[in-house]
Amino acid sequence: MAKCPLCGKPLDWGELIEQMLTLENAGEVFKDREKFVQTFEGFVFKCPHCGEEFYGRNLPEKEAKKVFELLNEFNGSIDWENQKVRLRLNSLLALDTMLEQWDKKVKG
Ligand SMILES: [Zn+2]
């Protein structure tokens, strides 16, 4: 799970993505995978716990890519008008990891 690189507290992906929704070109960014990854890496996030700022590249890339997929998989995952994420991204990511491990176990 994503953690603040400075204070080490767990971060909520929904909250992180909401910080990105303020971008002027957010509509394009969240449709284009490459653009998203690029923008994400260079985006300055602010930790809600310690208030420090850090770049997206300090967060796990695999999770960021999965978040992009999830947001595009579900219709209406983003409430653009209120700049809110409607999905519980952290729960979905946890579930995804669980299924992956289970899959490994079954196949292994
Ligand atoms: Zn922090």
Image (cartoon, rainbow, N blue to C red):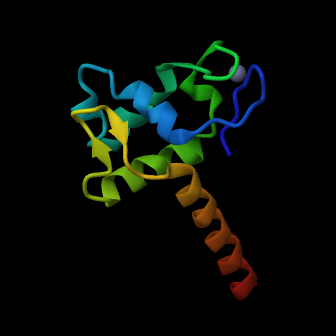
Residue at x 75% of width, y 19% of height: 6
Q: Does residue 39 appear anywhere in the picture?
A: no
Q: In which quadrant of the rendered image does the C terminus lie?
A: bottom right
Q: Is residue 26 above or below residue 100?
A: above
Whether residue 89 sits left or right of residue 106 in the image: it is left
x%, y% of residue 36?
37, 35
Q: Of all residues shown, which one is farthest toward the top?
A: 52
Q: Of all residues shown, which one is farthest toward the bottom?
A: 106
The image quarter in which residue 102 lies: bottom right
Quadrant of picture, ligand 1: top right
Residue sitting nearer the eye, 82 or 27: 82
Q: Is residue 105 above or below residue 98?
A: below
x%, y% of residue 104?
70, 77
Whether residue 36 sits left or right of residue 48 in the image: it is left
Q: How many marks?
A: 0
Q: Does residue 99 appear anywhere in the picture?
A: yes
Residue at x 24% of width, y 19% of height: 24
x%, y% of residue 91?
57, 57
x%, y% of residue 51?
64, 13
Residue sitting nearer the eye, 32 or 71: 71
Whether residue 102 sits left or right of residue 46 in the image: it is right
The image quarter in which residue 26 lies: top left
The image quarter in which residue 21 lies: top left
Residue at x 57% of width, y 47% of height: 63
Residue at x 65% of width, y 12% of height: 52
Whether residue 93 sits left or right of residue 23 in the image: it is right
